Amino acid sequence: MPLLSLLRPAKEVPLTWWSADDSMTTRPRGQTLIILLVGLWIFGTGDAILIAAGIGNTPWTVLAEGIANNIDRSVGQATFLVSVAVLFLWIPLKEKPGIGTILNVIIIAAAIEVMVPRLPTPETQLMAIAQVLLGVLLIGIGSGIYLTANLGPGPRDGWMTGLQRVSGIPIARVRGAIEITVLAIGWLVLGGTFGIGTIVFAVLIGPVVAVCLNLAGRFGSPGEVHG
């Protein structure tokens, strides 16, 4: 399997044997639900690994950590509050959450809450960077799994696509503006952790998610199971 083909941006989220037929279903297949939960927990664990590395978080976690520091709550709890707040921003955009959207809010925050206290603090810069790379890899894997479950976008993704639909602005610009805004507020206003880990995440997360989605599309083809 050529590496370059895996690195190509996915034009759409691939259909897999575990994908739900209807993203708005209230009664998904058990296997779809289990795979979704696994993907979300992996995603949250990857985020927790970045937090524990201590050299820079993802933009949204910079915001959550800044809020946590100012209201005397954990990062996991603040992540949950941020996700709920973003869901309220869906209302004027007339976006509809799926089961996956709600579980995204709960499971990722829970994974961060559970995993951060149990993860090691790196003793050297090299170990911290290695930990960041592992975190980015897990976030990419988790993203590939939960997106292909097709049970509704995460709160942030749904807000982004809703803004794009209403404004007509290209999705890349909408995403860039959101990420820069939350990063600036979280870092400059609230004191969240911005550093080399944030930069590594920003550079690598796109290619890592692309590889994971392309792998899911190749090895999770519905034809392999359903014929």
Image (cartoon, helix red, strand yellow):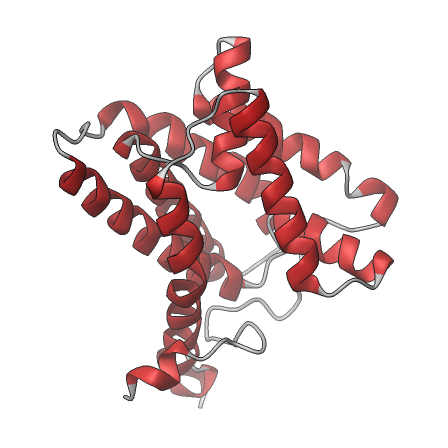
Q: Nearer the viewer, residue 140 or 180?
A: 180
Residue at the spot x=77%, y=54% of the render?
162
Q: Nearer the viewer, residue 197 or 99?
A: 197
Relative side of 141 to 202, left or right:
left
Up-down: is 171 above or below 67? below
Up-down: is 191 above or below 220? above
Using the rendered view, name the quadrant where residue 115 is placed.
top left
Residue at the spot x=43%, y=61% of the render?
145
Relative side of 12 to 208, left or right:
right
Residue at the spot x=53%, y=38% of the render?
60
Q: Say how many tags the image has.
A: 0
Relative side of 162 to 198, left or right:
right
Relative side of 2 to 186, left or right:
left
Residue 38 appears in the picture as rendered: no
Q: Position of residue 101 (x, y in %)?
A: 61, 47
Residue at the spot x=86%, y=57% of the render?
166
Using the rendered view, name the quadrant where residue 5 is placed.
bottom left
Residue 104 appears in the picture as rendered: yes
Q: Position of residue 192 (x, y in %)?
A: 47, 25
Q: Position of residue 59 (x, y in %)?
A: 51, 40
Using the rendered view, name the quadrant where residue 31 is placed.
bottom left
